[in-house]
Image: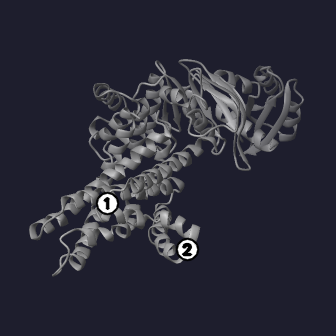
Amino acid sequence: MIEVKNLCKRYGPVLAVDGISFDVSEGEIVGFLGPNGAGKTSTIRVLTCYHPATSGSARIGGYDVFTQSLEVRRLIGYLPESTPLYPEMRVREYLNFRGKLHGLSAGERGDAITRVTGRCWLKDFIDRPIGHLSKGMRQRVGLADALLCNPKVLVLDEPTIGLDPTQIRETRNLIKQLGQDHTILFSSHILSEVEQTCSRIIIIAGGKLIARGTPEELRHNISAESRLIAEVRGPSADVKSAVGGMGGVASVELAEVDGWCRLKIAGNGGSDIREPLAKLLHDRGWGVRELRRETPTLEDYFVKVIAQQSGAA
Amino acid sequence: MRNVCPITQRELNAYFFSPIAYAVLAIFMLTLGILFMLTTFVAGGDSSLRQLVGLMPLVLAIFLPILTMRLLADEFRSGTIETLMTAPVDETEVILGKFFGALVFYCIMLLAMLAFAIVIAAFGRLDFGLLSATYIGLLLLGGLYIAVGVFFSACTSNQIIAAVCTIVPLMAFTFLADFLATKVSGFWGLILHHLSIQEHFGDFARGLVDLNDVVFFLTTAVLFLFFAVKVLESRRWR
């Protein structure tokens, strides 16, 4: 549905997007993740035909965003980052105006407005001026606008920014529901949000694509890097050398916490060393009050790849 | 061109939702009222709007840029241009929609101005032929001013800059060109004479609808609208 090939976007001397390629197939919900200033919005603006790419190409539903811009814009519903709206218009008026721009007839507009205001919890606010609405409400109006003409592709730029926790959860559920009949690309810099909603994740940083895959795949990439945390009572030098000498241990960090040695053990390779470690501690007669494996979260992965990226740059 | 109408409607609504429209309309009528009392409504005054209409190029060069300054500049400033241009709308539709929005509002100003014609009709004999020619002229003049205003509003995201940039060339081509045309002789004098808005408008104020003038106003307005479309389009390939 969305195909992006070697997309570059340059603002004067600044290269905001540097050769990104990805695709999104029909019916997928794809999360577009990256720190602030990674080039998410720049990429999205190319996809929504707001500005052109410096080089590379992007197609949506088979139409090229540069040469067949009008066809592309008929296919997509777009929620821009800051949800710009006309403050003097009432919600109904605004949606009616947007419906006209999308070429809906009066009857279709009425139905569409009922449908989207229902979906976006706007029924009670439909006759309020947009300027009087809170940030969260305005965000919903923007979302209602994006859904208005029932587009095949939804592009949402930071749809949950500025919302309170309840609204974030509601929006997340809404996005999941919408994924049943729309192809969705949405950007965020909040990882947990993307993790819970998306079938696939694309991570970009510094304008480059640095990782992509399903949340499970990305998590798998890092599960090899899991480490053990153990709290042991024993002479610290002995503990460190004994544990460090075990097979499958790459490094040991030791810190003394009120008489206990707190160990952070990094393994090399995928082997599970919990059992041999327990045996060793038992044989030496050292007391144990904690032994657990710490699996890195997607968040750690995110921070790590971003750090690698900025280190390389 | 299907989208011109909704955009025009939206612009008109935006005028009436903001205090600008009412302020412009009120101050416009107040200004005209004062000018009318000073020039026409005096003993031995003309029973026509001629005196008043003669001042219109100046009055409109101040009032119309205030109307047009927000048309696109405000969309750029608030970011609504992004939602507008990512909808299936083309640049010509946006520019024409905005132009007609301001033009319709200007027509309301011209209708209000008929009050002075009614006063004249009550106290003297009103020449309807002259009045019609005057109104055709005012419509064309306003159309040109608004087109220039739309163009400069498309060039910046700052409304004040848009207004100033519109007022300066309008003043220059209305008065300076007229003034210089009398000072410079020969080829350049002729050019200035033809470029003077005052000169072209003067015929209408005298009750003369000259095709020359009609073509001048229409083509110049179309030219500025065309430039405005190009400025807006340039965003797509910059």
Measured as percent of width and height from the top left, residue A183 is found at 52, 22
Q: Is residue B115 visible?
A: yes
x 36%, y 33%: residue: A100
Name the outermost residue toward the front: B186
The reply to whether callout 2 and callout 1 are in contact (CB within 8 Å) is no
Q: Chain of mark 1?
A: B
As drawn, the label of residue B141 is: none
Measured as percent of width and height from the top left, residue B200 is found at 41, 62
x 80%, y 41%: residue: A254
Q: Quadrant of the C terminus of chain B?
A: top right
Dot 2 falls on a residue whose secondary structure is: loop
As drawn, the label of residue B208 is: 1
Measured as percent of width and height from the top left, residue A134 is found at 38, 48
Q: Chain of mark 2?
A: B
> On the same chain: label 2 and label 1?
yes
| Residue B146 against residue A308 in the figure, above or below | below
| Structural crowding at the residue carrying mark 1, measured as other residues with C-alpha within 10 Å and reported as few (<14), some (14–19) or many (≥20) | some
Dot 1 falls on a residue whose secondary structure is: loop
| Residue A94 against residue B155 in the figure, above or below | above
Q: Is residue B182 left or right of residue A238?
A: left
Q: Which residue is more in the foreground, A234 or A87?
A: A87
| Residue B70 against residue A282 in the figure, above or below | below
As drawn, the label of residue B185 is: 2
| Structural crowding at the residue carrying mark 2, measured as other residues with C-alpha within 10 Å and reported as few (<14), some (14–19) or many (≥20) | few
Q: CA distance from mark 2 to mark 1?
A: 26 Å
Q: Quadrant of the N terminus of chain B?
A: top left
Q: Amino acid at mark 2?
A: Ser
Measured as percent of width and height from the top left, residue A297 is found at 65, 31
Q: Amino acid at mark 1?
A: Leu
Pointer 2 or 1: first along the chain: 2
| Residue B91 against residue B29 in the figure, above or below | above
Q: Which residue is more in the foreground, B105 or B214?
A: B214
